[in-house]
Image: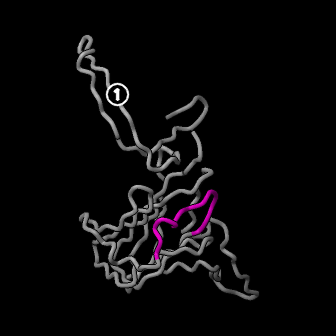
Amino acid sequence: MKRPGRVVKRLTVRTRTLDPDDEDIIHGYMPLDLQFFAHDPTWYADTESTTELPLGWLTGGGFAAPVVAPIYVQDGTVAADRPGWVTNAGDADAWPILRVFGPCATVTITHVASGRSLALPTLNLPVGRWIEIDTRPGYRTVTWDNGGNASTYLSPSSRIDLFAIPPGTSEMRWTAFDSTNSARLRVTWRDAYIAL
């Protein structure tokens, strides 16, 4: 939906009723009674936001090369300084889709501000494969790249239903074992709004 002077927002719905009225067909047009069910009352941005994080990024700051005396430590707190920052420009929690690309094993994804994490301790993801964790209400799945169920890899303490991106800018981190340093985490989300 788009209201004058505002950005386009979308609502995720499913069709509950589709009732055509055969008796009132006029010039080939048939009246329809449509009813939709919104399992999530949150409005979302029409466009997706995405960021991709490599493994092994030092998120606590570090030294700027070349290192010469005196040594100044960079704090690395600005989003442009390092990957991993996500910005939800809305005023409600956004629900990300997290896609991990192999090769890697023993994956943990953490939302730094809340401390919430999703752990896949027994996952061993080969080269060319990926696994997706969908935290959106009404979906909340863990699937392989071929559509197969991968929820058994998620640890019992991992709560998909609480893993949200709050309004504003926050940081995502992830850890895994990868000797090639080629594994990636892709975070995709839509800004979320309480109202239209």
Give the percent coordinates (x, y) of residue 135: 44, 62
Give the percent coordinates (x, y) of residue 80: 61, 64
Front-most of 81 and 162?
162
Does 88 appear in magenta? no
Give the percent coordinates (x, y) of residue 174: 49, 76
SS for tag 1? strand
Q: Tell me how many marks there are.
A: 1
Write down the residue under mark 1.
33
Q: Is residue 7 left or right of residue 160?
A: right
Residue drawn at (25%, 11%), measured in percent from left and top? 27
Does 170 appear in magenta? yes
Residue 31 in the image: above or below residue 184: above
> Magenta segment, which residues?
158-171
Quarter location, residue 81: bottom right
Q: Is residue 56 left or right of residue 104?
A: right
Q: Amino acid at mark 1?
A: Asp
Q: Is residue 21 left or right of residue 78?
A: left
